[in-house]
Image (spheres, rainbow, N blue to C red):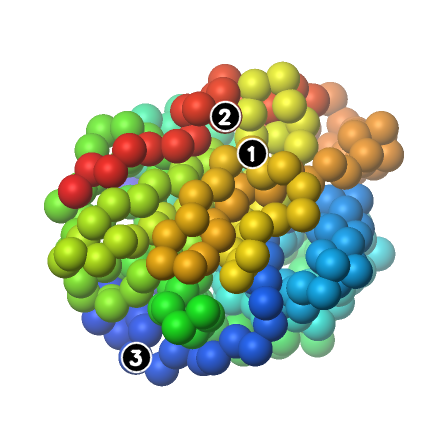
Amino acid sequence: MTEGRSCPLAYRYSAESLCQEPRPVSEDVLYIIGGLYGNPWALDEIEQMALTEETQGHRVKLVFNGDFNWFNASDSLFRSINNRVLDHTVSLGNVDYELANPSAGAGCGCAYPDFVDQGVVERSNRIMERLQAFASEHPDIQRRLSLLPRYRCLIFGGLKVLVVHGDPESLAGWGLAHEAFTAGNDSKLSEWFLASGADVIACTHTCLPVLWSGLVGEQSRVVVNNGSAGMGNLQSDPRGLITRIGLSSPVIEPVAGIQRQGLHVSLMPVSFPLEAWLPEFDRLWPAGSPAAVSYRNRILSGTSLSADDVIFPSLI
């Protein structure tokens, strides 16, 4: 299979294994941050959002579920992003995995499905090659990345919150992608929830946001995919998104949110200053570079989705 479409065996796991040792959380709010993509201004804003919560008496735990690296193609930014993120609770994305443990034939490790254009795949492989060159100059960061888990299961508000990068079968799985929900993935959802015992599954990787809730085994379950924290997710909207799971409602207006079993699950906008980030992106990835071709328009203008397109009705 073509590099960038394959899924290394090391990415695989079983849904049954994911919540066998859940870790209790003492904080009042989880911020689950996927797809930061090396954007330092988005990280600044997320930290400020957490401080704002804390002024309201909400203790916030930052949980990064992968791909915090991608556009940070300079020694200083690579080091800064990783040092800042690794101060928190972190699990790997395919990007971070391939920076620490390059897999032969994996390319970017994205495991892109057939509906993704081959040009996107090839450009992602070239982005990864460039970023791996920077990572090789920072063996201490590579070692810290290599020690990270591929997923986490947290006990929050008495419920199991499963934090993955891709889906409950693979680090780079697309089973919780927006496209998968559009096509109808109800049998897989049921299988994964029953096997894992999770009440909430929080993911990222597939770049488009999803908020779904439904009954599985007579219990209410939730899937939330934040799309990307570091670039736009909605039409004509350059803001990133993160997942907020709290015992109380958010202090700013979410893009989408639901309340289930005492938890507020929300997709929160990350209003980083585009006027600061875009010139830095252009410096690192000038016109014609693989990242500029694949991502610059999205960074400027978001995607084709409206906020309503993010919310999926119960499928089960």
Q: Earlier in the sequence, mark 2 or mark 1?
A: 1
Q: Which residue is drawn at 37% across and 68% down?
A: 159
Q: What whole-number distance in Å separates the C-alpha atoms at marks 2 and 3? A: 35 Å
Amino acid carrying mark 2 in the image: Ala
In this view, the residue in front, 280 or 240, is 240
Q: Which residue is label 2 attached to?
A: 307
Q: What whole-number distance in Å separates the C-alpha atoms at marks 2 and 1? A: 6 Å
Q: Would you place residue 33 above or below residue 232 in this image?
A: below
In this view, the residue in front, 102 or 146, is 146
Q: Where is residue 254 in the image (x, y as percent from the top left)?
A: 58, 38
Q: Is mark 3 on a helix, strand or loop?
A: loop
Residue 20 marker: 3
Locate residue 269 relative to residue 243 in the image: left or right: right
Near mark 2 (Cα within 10 A), the count class, few <14, some 14-19 or many ≥20, is few
Residue 283 visible here:
no
Q: In which quarter of the image is residue 312?
A: top left
Q: In which quarter of the image is residue 100?
A: bottom right
Amino acid carrying mark 1 in the image: Val
Q: Would you place residue 186 above or below residue 105 in this image?
A: above
Q: Which residue is label 1 attached to?
A: 255
- Residues at marks 3 and 1 touching, judged by CB atoms closer than 8 Å: no
In this view, the residue in front, 286 or 268, is 268
